[in-house]
Image (cartoon, helix red, strand yellow):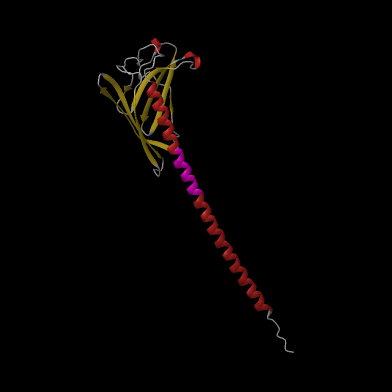
């Protein structure tokens, strides 16, 4: 019987090469998996950011629409409230700020007369609000100075905010329509959205 002795040096060399190839394949697999994970993580983060932008914009416009619809309401006494010095229930200052007052029963500290102002300052968007106890204390437009930003300024910036008001006549009825447009984008500009609404005042005179 013929026997052949294996070359131990050859075996060691083969094992080393196999180990190196195996390690290289492992590194490639890890790199691919890591790349896919980071890509999925980035996509999820971007989707979340886009969703937050849309939700923030829609919620802000919804609250603003509700506020404007209440503008001038005096608690059912038959007249319309106006900011001090204003000629109408909706007061515009330029095209990027709007103010009004309305009665809201059971407000904190009995400050049922809510003075409200929305305004754009550079790339930031503010709501300014101050309640007073009586109608005689209603503020002027400039007097509403307790303000807070409505969006996270480190993430979003306002690209536009325009407000206009027009009078609409239907037969013998005259009403006022307020048009609002608001634009929002992420700081890096990747995501942006513009939304708008038009609303007829309930308590306009």
Rendered position, 5 above or below 93: below
**Count of marks placed on residues:** 0
Q: Residue furthest bottom?
A: 1
Res 20 seen here: yes
Q: Residue at x 47, y 44 (%)?
A: 47
Measuring from the top left, give residue 93's x and y in whole percent.
31, 24
Measuring from the top left, give residue 156's x and y in whole percent.
42, 37
Position of the N terminus by quadrant: bottom right
Measuring from the top left, give residue 92's x and y in whole percent.
31, 23
Magenta residues: mostly which secondary structure? helix
Rendered position, 74 above or below 49: above
Q: Inspect the magenta stretch and tell me whether residue 25 lies in it.
A: no
Q: Residue at x 51, y 49 (%)?
A: 41
Q: Nearer the viewer, residue 150 or 135?
A: 135
Q: Residue at x 44, y 42 (%)?
A: 50
Measuring from the top left, give residue 26's x and y in whole percent.
59, 63
Rendered position, 158 above or below 148: below
Q: Residue furthest front?
A: 171
Q: Nearer the viewer, residue 193 or 145?
A: 193
**Quarter of the view holding residue 63:** top left
**Quarter of the view holding residue 97:** top left
Position of the C terminus by quadrant: top left
Q: Nearer the viewer, residue 8 or 185?
A: 185
Res 155 seen here: no
Q: Inspect the magenta stretch and tell me whether residue 42 lies in it.
A: yes
- Region rendered in magenta: 41-52
Q: Residue furthest right?
A: 1
- Compared across the picture, whether 112 is left or right of 200 comes to right
């Amino acid at each position: 019987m013929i026997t052949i002795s294996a070359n131990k040096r050859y075996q060691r060399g083969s094992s080393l090469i196999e180990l190196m190839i195996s390690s290289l394949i492992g590194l490639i697999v890890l790199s691919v998996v890591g790349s896919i994970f980071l890509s999925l993580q980035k996509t999820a983060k971007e989707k979340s950011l886009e969703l937050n932008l849309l939700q923030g914009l829609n919620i802000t416009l919804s609250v603003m629409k509700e506020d404007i619809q209440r503008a001038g309401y005096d608690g059912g006494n038959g007249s319309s409230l106006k900011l001090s010095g204003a000629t109408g229930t909706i007061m515009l200052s330029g095209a990027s700020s709007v103010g009004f007052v309305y009665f809201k029963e059971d407000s904190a500290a009995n400050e049922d007369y809510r003075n409200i102002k929305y305004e754009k300052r550079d790339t930031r968007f503010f709501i300014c609000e101050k309640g007073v106890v009586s109608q005689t204390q209603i503020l002027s437009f400039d007097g509403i100075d307790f303000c807070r930003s409505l969006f996270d300024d480190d993430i979003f910036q306002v690209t536009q905010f325009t407000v206009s008001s027009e009078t609409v006549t239907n037969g013998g009825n005259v009403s006022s329509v307020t048009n609002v447009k608001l634009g929002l984008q992420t700081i890096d500009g990747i995501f942006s959205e513009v939304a708008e609404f038009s609303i007829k005042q309930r308590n306009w005179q």
